[in-house]
Amino acid sequence: MRRALALVLLLAAAVPAAARADAPTAATPTIKLVVEKAGGDRDPIALTGEHFRVRVIVTPYVPGQTVTVRVQRGASKLRVKQLAITRPAGATAGQALIGFTPKSGGRLRIRASHLATPELGTAVAPERTVSVVSGKVAGGRGPSVRLLQRLLARKGYVTGQRGLFDARTARAVLAFRKLSGLVRTAVADRTVFRRLVKGGGAFAVRYPKHGHHVEADLTHQVIALIDHGRVQRIYPISSGKPSTPTVLGNFRVYRKDPGTNAKGMVFSSYFTGGYAIHGYADVPTYAASHGCLRTPVPDAVPIYDWVKLGDRVDVYYRSGEHGSKRIANPGP
C-alpha cells in the first residue's frame, strides 16, 4: 500500500516537471543606451535649451515589449517614460528613442530597464551620464570652466589651473577661436561650446611624417607642437606683418637661446637666419611681428623646452595666401 502511494506521488510530481520542460523559456536580453546629437562619446555633453536624444537598443528583439527610461539630476526625477520597442527595417535589434531638452545645467543620469515578461527576461542598461552646460564662461571658476578646459585639452589647447578661467585658459580659448575662424577674443560663449562639443577646432596636421616638429599656421595665427602626427599643444602666435613677413617653408631648429636678449626676445628657438619662435611682451591677435613667430611670454619656456635642436619647423598659409621667402635678420 505504501509502495503504491509513493508511486502515485512520484507520477504527480513528474507531470508538472514535464510540462515546465516543454514550456518556452524567456530570452535573456541586453540593453544599451546611445546618446545622440550631443558632443562627445564616452562622456556626452549638451547645452541648455538644445535638444539631444537617447537611443535604447535591446537585443534580442521580441515583439510587444517595452522599456522604461528615467532621466534624473541629483535626487530629482526629470522624466520617466515607458517606450515601445520596435525593430527598424534592416535592423536585428529592437530599438526605442527618447528626446530631451535640458533647461538648466548639471549632470544628468539616464537609465533604462525592462521588467520580465514570459517572452523576455529582466534587464537593466548600464547608466549613461550627460554633462549639461549653459554654454558661456567669461571668467571665474566652477564646473563649466572645468568642462571647457577638458574639451580644449582634448584638442591640444593648453589650459591653466583646473576649474579656474585664468590667463592661460583664456589664451587657449583665443587659439581655438582663431583656428575655428571665429572673432579673435578670449570669450567662451555658446558658439565656442557648441563647436567644441561637436568636435570642432581640431588642428589639421600637414606634415605627419616630420616626427617631433612644429607647424606654424599663419592663416590662423597659431602654432602646433606635433609628435609623429599627433598634436601635443596648440598656442596663439603673432607672425610677421605684411611689411616684414615671416619666411615660408620647411626648416630645422639650428640654435636655441635661453633668457631674454636685448631685443626683448624671450627663450628663442631659431629655425632659419634671424627667424625664431620666441616669447614677446606684445602678441596681438593678428600678424604684427618683424618676421618671427611671437608667443605670449608665459608660453615661451614650455615651448622652448619642448622644441629640440634639429626639429623641423614648417611655416605655411592654409588659404593660399602668399608670403615672402626672403631670409634676413628680421628680429622680433
Image (cartoon, grey):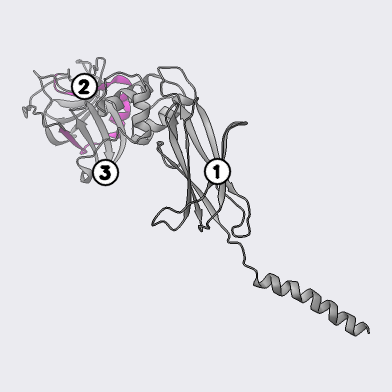
Kindly identify which residue carries mark 3.
229
Camera sees residue 44? no
- At label 1, counting other C-alpha atoms closer than 10 Å, the crowd grade (few under 14, some 14-19, many 20 or more) is few
Callout 3 amino acid? Gly
Q: Where is residue 30 shown, x and y percent of the image?
A: 54, 54
Check the picture and name the quadrant holding the N terminus. Answer: bottom right
Residue 308 position by quadrant: top left
Does label 3 or label 2 sit earlier along the sequence? 3
- Looking at the rendered structure, the secondary structure element under dot 3 is loop
Evaluate if marks 1 and 2 touch, with contact meaning CB atoms under 8 Å apart: no
Q: Mark 2 points at which residue?
A: 238
| Residue type at the position of mark 2 | Ser
The correct choice, above or below, for 168 with respect to 43 in the image is: above
Residue at label 1? 127
The residue positioned 26% from the left and 33% from the top of the image is 224
Q: Give the range drawn in magenta.
A: 290-316
Q: What element carries label 2?
A: loop
Q: At which x and y percent is residue 256?
A: 22, 29
Q: Identify which amino acid the numbered label 1 is placed on.
A: Glu
